[in-house]
Structures are given as C-alpha cells and as structure tokens.
Image (cartoon, rainbow, N blue to C red):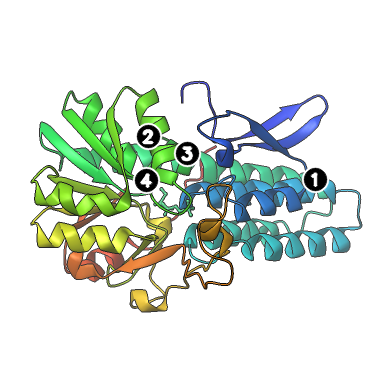
C-alpha cells in the first residue's frame, strides 16, 4: 500500500478534486478515480469503489467539498441549498455504516457555523478544513486502535478475519488490520486467515492484497471453510471491523460475520471487534434497530461475470448482519478495550469528537 492511496484530496493548478482508489478493480488493476462532482462520489460509494465504514465517512466529507466548489458561483442562498441537497444525496448511498451519517453531520454543522460568512469561497475553505479533519483524525484513531488491540494478540498467533477492515477501508492503516499491523510491528509472529467474503470478495480481493503487500502471512479460504479451521484448532483469535455498533454492544458487520462469531463462541476463541467511536451509535439501544442494506441480486447470481443461479430463482443478499453482544469478547476503540457489559463503557467514552487541530 506504500504508494497507493485509498483516498486523498488533490489540489493542483487545474483545480481540486477527490481521488479514490477504485477498489472494484483490485487486485488486477490499481487505478484511481477522479471525483469532480458529487454524483461521482455518491456512485463510488454505492458501487463500493470506496468502501469500509470509516473510508465511506471520509469520502462523503470530501464529497461535500467537491459539491461546494462546484456551486461556488451561485448566490449564497442557492449555494447553501445546493450543499444541503448534496448532503442528502450522499446520505442516501448506503444505510448501515453510521460513520457516513456522522461525517455528514459534521459537515452540516460546519456549514451552519459559517452562516455569517457571506463569501462562498471562504465557506468552501472551512468545509475543506472540516473534511481534512475527518480524514486526519481517522489516521490517528487507526493508530490508537492498533496500539490498544495489539496488547490482546499473543506473541505467536493465528488470526481469522472477515471482509476488509484495513487501509483500504479507512484513511489510515485500518481497524481490524490496524491491530494486525501493530502486532506485527511489535515482532509478533502472525498468520492470518482471510475469509474470501462472499459475494463481493473483499477478503480475497482486498484483505489478501493489502496483507501480502505488507509481507504478512495470509491465506484465503472460502467462507464455508472457516468451521473446519476452527475444528482443527487452527484459529486462536478472530478480529473484525464494524459498520455500526449499538449501545448494548451488538455489532453490525459484513454479512457472514455472525457465523464467524458463532463459530468462535463454539470453539472458545476470542472474537474481537475493532472500530472507532464514530462507528458507535448510542441512539440505538440494540442491534435489531440497525438498518441493514439489501444489495442487488446480481451480486450473487452473476457475481463472477457469468450466471451462477438459474434464471427466475430468488436471491437473498443482505450486505451486513448483526452479531449479538454476548458473542463479542471485546470492542476495541481509540479509547481502549471494552468488555461486557459494554454499555457503561461505551457511554463513558461518549460520541466521537473531532480534534480541532489541522
Ligand atoms: O460493504 P463493505 O465492503 O463496505 O463492508 C465493509 C465491512 O463490513 C467492514 O468490515 C467494516 O466497514 C469495517 S471497515 C474498517
């Protein structure tokens, strides 16, 4: 990942734009997408060109700036209305990752804080500063989660992960994979098993790609092979990320995570969830209230570029599932390691607040 940027703001003589690594092309192609308008950013989020809860939040924050720059020549009233409508468009892209709504609320708050500024260009500058803050904070949070999480990893460990919660899913080195990178940097001997993560193969295409780039021993398995690995006593730790955590510690993450948690419980293996507090939604008492994104049936029926399900057969394709808190051994955030009962600790840590520096 050294020279590859999941997302970054470009500011050059010709203008300013958001650049995203198009993750749908990985691992075959490393190609960036230039986003010069809000629709391109929204489409990139919907199509998972940029994905992973924190990265979606950062992309959306920059998406607001992209839209503001485009609307800069409008009257102040029309300019503000245009930004509000951009925020609505970005909020309608994906429903589960709460980081998206958290980042957009931050941008909306910045917009309202600039109500006294008559100059649209100055408002754009403030919005850009706010988006940079979301991005820079995410890097710092990843580092802190990595440090806290690495303490839980044994000197020699075989870890199972699901989906991709790494550098491709954040502005930094990742949440779940951040823990792995931090533990590896401490000299721990790690082997990682990455579930391929049907139907879009984030584990096979993305996690395996970035771990192999980092010289971490990684093996991909079909999701259905995980049980046999646990049964063989091969896995000592499970680490995953999250898209939304309810106040009681129920965890939404990529579809299939619940199955992994059940296996971990059955085989006595710790199941760790790593996520910043911007992923915690204290307004939801439990995980059954988390909205679960349903995605196109063709992701399952034609996922490999050819039809694999008979015509006319129905498809069930939720993007996420919810792991109940009793299956979660610990939740690691930038503040530290929370264990059951989760609610008092999550409440004490409070809602994510951005740093003022940048
Ligand atoms: O549909 P995706 O690829 O956006 O799903 C991503 C996940 O489920 C990740 O595990 C989660 O967002 C955490 S990323 C740090």
Real-space Cα separation, disc 1 to disc 4, in angstroms = 39 Å
* Residue that appears at 12% across and 45% down: 236
Instruction: Name the side, left or right, on which 322 lies relative to 307.
Output: left
Above or below, comparing residue 253 to residue 2 in the picture: below
Mark earlier in primary sequence (4, 2)? 4
* Quadrant containing the C terminus in the rendered view: top right
Real-space Cα separation, disc 2 to disc 1, in angstroms = 37 Å
Mark earlier in primary sequence (2, 3)? 3
Nearer the viewer's eye, disc 2 or disc 1? 2
Numbered disc 1: secondary structure: helix
Label 3 beta carbon less than 8 Å to ligand 1: no
Mark 3 sits on what residue?
168
Nearer the viewer's eye, disc 3 or disc 1? 3
Residue 262 placement (x, y as % from top left): 20, 64
Residue 30 in sight here: yes
Mark 4 sits on what residue?
196
Nearer the viewer's eye, disc 4 or disc 2? 4
* Residue that appears at 47% across and 46% down: 355
- Within 10 Å of the Cα at label 1, are there few (<14), some (14-19), or many (20+) other Cα atoms? many
Residue 2 placement (x, y as % from top left): 47, 21
Q: Which mark is residue 208?
A: 2
Residue 123 in sight here: no
- Within 10 Å of the Cα at label 2, are there few (<14), some (14-19), or many (20+) other Cα atoms? many
Above or below, comparing residue 173 to residue 231 in the picture: above
Residue contact at pointers 3 and 1, CB within 8 angstroms: no
Real-space Cα separation, disc 4 to disc 2, in angstroms = 9 Å
Q: Which mark is residue 69?
A: 1
Numbered disc 3: secondary structure: helix
| Front residue of 53 and 69 | 53
Instruction: Name the side, left or right, on which 322 lies relative to 5.
Output: left
Numbered disc 2: secondary structure: helix
Mark earlier in primary sequence (3, 1)? 1
């Amino acid at each position: 990942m050294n020279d590859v940027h999941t997302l970054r703001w470009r500011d050059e003589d010709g203008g300013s734009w958001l650049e995203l690594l198009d993750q749908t092309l990985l691992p075959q192609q490393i190609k960036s997408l230039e986003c010069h308008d809000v629709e391109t950013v929204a489409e990139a989020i919907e199509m998972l060109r940029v994905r992973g809860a924190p990265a979606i939040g950062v992309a959306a924050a920059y998406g607001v700036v992209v839209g503001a720059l485009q609307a800069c020549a409008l009257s102040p009233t029309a300019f503000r209305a245009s930004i509000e409508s951009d925020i609505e468009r970005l909020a309608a892209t994906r429903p589960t990752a709460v980081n998206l709504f958290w980042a957009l609320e931050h941008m909306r708050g910045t917009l309202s804080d600039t109500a006294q500024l008559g100059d649209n260009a100055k408002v754009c500058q403030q919005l850009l500063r706010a988006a940079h803050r979301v991005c820079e904070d995410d890097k710092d949070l990843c580092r802190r989660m990595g440090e806290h999480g690495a303490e839980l990893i044994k000197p020699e460990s075989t870890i199972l992960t699901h989906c991709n919660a790494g550098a491709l899913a954040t502005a930094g080195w990742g949440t779940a994979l951040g823990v792995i990178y931090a533990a590896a940097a401490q000299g721990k001997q790690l082997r990682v098993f990455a579930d391929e993560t049907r139907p879009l193969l984030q584990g096979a295409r993305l996690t395996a790609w970035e771990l192999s780039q980092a010289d971490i021993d990684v093996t991909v398995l079909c999701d259905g092979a995980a049980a046999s690995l646990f049964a063989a006593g091969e896995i000592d730790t499970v680490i995953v990320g999250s898209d939304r955590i309810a106040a009681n510690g129920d965890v939404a993450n990529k579809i299939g995570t619940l199955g992994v948690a059940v296996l971990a419980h059955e085989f006595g293996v710790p199941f760790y969830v790593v996520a910043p507090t911007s992923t915690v939604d204290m307004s939801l008492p439990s995980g059954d209230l988390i909205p679960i994104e349903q995605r196109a049936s063709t992701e399952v029926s034609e996922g490999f570029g050819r039809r694999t399900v008979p015509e006319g057969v129905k498809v069930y394709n939720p993007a996420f599932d919810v792991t109940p808190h009793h299956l979660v051994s610990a939740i690691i955030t930038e503040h530290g390691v929370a264990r059951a009962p989760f609610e008092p600790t999550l409440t004490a840590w409070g809602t994510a607040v951005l740093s003022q520096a940048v």
